[in-house]
Amino acid sequence: MTAVKFNIDTVDHAVQTPDVELPWAALGLKDNEFQRVVEILGRRPTAAELAMYSVMWSEHCSYKSSKVHLKQFGDKVTEGMLEHLLVGIGENAGVVDIGDGWAVTFKVESHNHPSFVEPYQGAATGVGGIVRDIISMGARPVAVMDPLRFGAIDHPDTPRLVHGIVAGIGGYGNSLGLPNIGGEVVFDSVYQGNPLVNALAVGVLRHEDIRLANASGVGNKVVLFGARTGGDGIGGASVLASESFDAGKPSKRPAVQVGDPFAEKVLIECCLELFKASVVEGIQDLGAAGISCATSELASNGDGGMHVELTSVLLRDPTLTPGQILMSESQERMMAVVTPSNVASFEAIMDKWNVEYSWLGEVTDTGRLIIEWDGEKIVDVDPRTVAHDGPVYNRPFHRPTWLDAVQADSFSADRPADLKAAVLKLMASPNMCSKDWVTNQYDRYVQGNTALAMPDDAGVVRVDEETGLGIALSTDANGRYSYLNPYEGARLALAEAYRNVATSGAKPMAVTDCLNFGSPEDPEVMWQFAESVRGLADACQELGVPVTGGNVSLYNQTGGVPIHPTPVVGVLGVFDDVARRTPSGWREDGQAIYLLGTTRNELDGSEWANLHGHLGGQPPAVDLGAEKTLAAILVNSSRDGMIDAAHDLSEGGLAAALSEAALRFGVGARIALDELCERDGVDPFTALFSESQARAVVAVPRSEEVRFNDMCTARNFPRLRIGVVDAENGALDVQGHFVLPLAELKEVHEATLPNHFA
Amino acid sequence: MTVETPLIGSSAAPIPDETLTGIRVGVISFPGSLDDRDAMRAVRIAGGTAVDLWHGDHDLKGVDAVVIPGGFSYGDYLRAGAISRFAPLMEQISAAASSGTLPVLGICNGFQVLTEAHLLPGSMIKNNHLHFLCRDQRLKVENTTTAWTSSYNAGDEIVVPLKNQDGQFVADERTLDELEGEGRVVFRYVGGNPNGSRRDIAGISNAAGNVVGLMPHPEHAVEAGFGPDSSAFGDVGLRGGVDGLDIFTSVLKKLVK
């Protein structure tokens, strides 16, 4: 095609005009960073080079503030943790061996800033981006999950965000044919101007199908395929995702990408066919920083050089400048490296799927990434300096001065006398109410392998139809816990996700994380971040589950007020046979209900305290040794058929766990708290609402009670028979305290979201 | 009631009936089809042989019946099914279906394709509540003489997943009266209309009964462990619902005869 003629800023021109003013600050670069670019190049950058460095050195792409802390995930590992890890941190997503030649790749990412500016497209393209990461590993995507955090449920701006974000996730994920199997929906005014939209995707592949993002083999061809490049998402990674929101600044809407799920669905099938036919040597999706990222990463991970003719890029808008083309974050694009002998087969597959493609250039061993515009050189850089050698900051941090006062302010409100009213209030509250209104907008059936989904503790998907081999996934975080104590908060997030996976019956294997924080330039936020990473890395080591990848989202703050530190942790577990998965609800009359674990007076940071507008004290204590034993009991009980239901205790404590287990299949229970209160030295209110960790309720068939008790005794783990399943009474009967008809509970539990949003 | 959690594989094993495995049921994939592999699995679980068909081909590969699966073919961007109906393979399907010989089942997006292709009357518009809705849906099987429903008994109810955005069936009053009068309303929503469909219609057939379209997804209620939590035929336990399986056994048994 004929290139549009701009007044092109070539490398030669840059050499001749050293004093030209460049808009580096508007592109998000700091003065010292711009000087560093000049130093690397030995001259001023061209406009195109400046565009590349500005996006690739953004916080979002370079992890410049977080890098020094994140290395703990690589340092604090044991050999045992690496045993099942096929691909670790640094690639598009980690890959875990789950046996029988199968591997799983999974990752969670943020799309927070775009989702606030443009909720539908922001959330939709968040799904699209993480799914492309999974495809680029060589995997077929098999499920998604979405941990979401919104502002106050009754704030006037919340419906705009809830409607847009939920519809965006559904609109994109449903159109891709990916079951949505779990996630979180949390409301807290601290997220009012900074909703958190995290997206997790998981894919499966055979070991031999793993693909990596590198451009090797001199003379191999570089091809861009999928959607055309347009003017959307320019500066998405830099000026949008790497800065705080401020009133009075112009809208950042043009920095949000626009999604086309149909194009992505076709891209998935087309890529899988490319992999099957073995016609690509290396592949990289185009996400943040678009062509800048793909070319520089592919080149620096491979033979070190690449030569690209930028006018070959197919455009939606012919007036785009070279810099805009390099920065565009248009969705549904992939870049691949193909040997000359495979070019024809590659083109045949593109033609079959009607996917557009253009050959941009080839791999070289010059160590330089050369980009030309109609034959004139506009970029001449060492790709490593763009992709990997960005600035690294050891930002100052210190413990917040306000934290002592907050931690000293323990929750001390009166215990309510009416426990039934308290349970109803809890279960109708925004965070504990039924999320059906949201999850019913997501397809959980497609692909036919979903063995558990919302509202059970983890999402469970079959991988191998012959053997039943499968996986479980759960994501968790508690921003209030992390606000009170970021080190413990991160450990609590991991403990809960780990417990959820084990509750479903799967053996926890690996971790992905999405670390959502305020501005790293605020030393108190930076301290929260440092403490969270330290806590998570320590806890991963103690539980023996490695972090395989993830994402950091900083600058989640508006007008100087940061969000609560919110480290979202996703845990992957494995089943030999998903037929053994354990649901969260009771079904069979007469089964014994046991509470596993110890209940302490731990109401600080709890949902109950939250309902009373209180946030102070210390979060519940973490005992990872107890979590490990509990998980082993839950996994073994599931495998050996000793339990028919299990539900973990977390937000809302025993009250929430009993309510949810009863509502799951509409089967009630008779519960006695006396023995529990006596053993653990707590009052009935605390027994119901405390959020002590390492606990779960299970339903044990009568025939299995002896075996189950023996196992708990052998592992020296506290358990107590607190009741029986009652399929006749239609109520949660907490003896001596209240009888709560399930119909009444269900009504208030399910009414909250429709009342606000339907 | 005592409920055994069914083990995966126990009911998924193909029915060892060689007469059924001889029946070849094609499942057509368009760009954007999503439930195509699921429909093929349903055919296999019912005991038949599933054959994948490509929209751009001109060859029906000698199949005995065709399923047009769910999804968002061509993104549903213009109008659900509006582009797919022009696929080369749809010409062959339309010709064989119109002559009353080839059994054709359209599920969800497949139903939309059938209305766009004028193999079935009416049309689908956006759900009246404007949201995508995924839920387990109870249906009444009102006609058990079609190619796809003969294994059910008159008056049977079934529970199958419903999941769509544009599921509201509409037609003019005369067409609706005709459908009712000729017994061509095959499935009707019970226990609440999920999307505003006229006269609670969930599925219809052509006059000959070989072409059936329905919005809910029977292929997602065929395998114990991966279906709905409930069944209209009694307590089935966790994801044990397989009420949709007889849609597929119906056509296999009919073709064997």
Image (cartoon, rainbow, N blue to C red):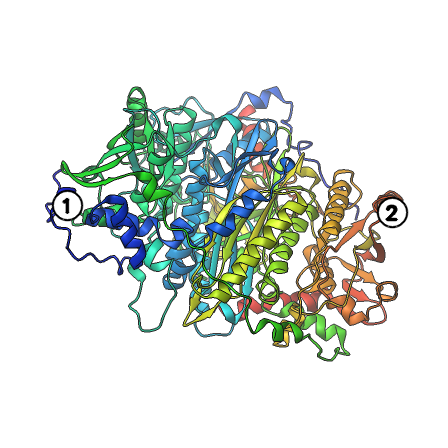
Helix, strand or loop at disc 2?
helix
- x and y, in percent, of residue A758 in the image: 49, 67
Pick the residue in front: B162 or B93.
B162
Give the number of the disc on residue B251. none
Q: Chain of mark 2?
A: A
Helix, strand or loop at disc 1?
helix
Residue A162 relative to residue A744: left or right: left
Picture residue at 40% right of the left edge, 53% below the top: A60
- x and y, in percent, of residue A351 in the image: 29, 30
Label 2 CA crowd tier, 10 Å (few <14, some 14–19, many 20+): few
Picture residue at 38% right of the left edge, 58% below the top: A242
Q: Which residue is mark 1?
A: A15
Q: Which residue is mark 2?
A: A713
User: Which amino acid is tagged 2?
Assistant: Thr
Q: Vertically, is A600 above or below B103?
A: below
Q: Earlier in the sequence, mark 1 or mark 2?
A: 1
Cα distance in 3D space between marks 1 and 2: 77 Å
User: Which amino acid is tagged 1?
Assistant: Val
Pick the residue in front: A717 or B15.
A717
Pick the residue in front: B186 or A201.
A201
Q: Vertically, is A554 above or below A332?
A: below
Residue A542 relative to residue A102: left or right: right
Residue A348, image quadrant: top left
Residue A475 visible (yes or no): no
Q: Are marks 1 and 2 on the same chain?
A: yes
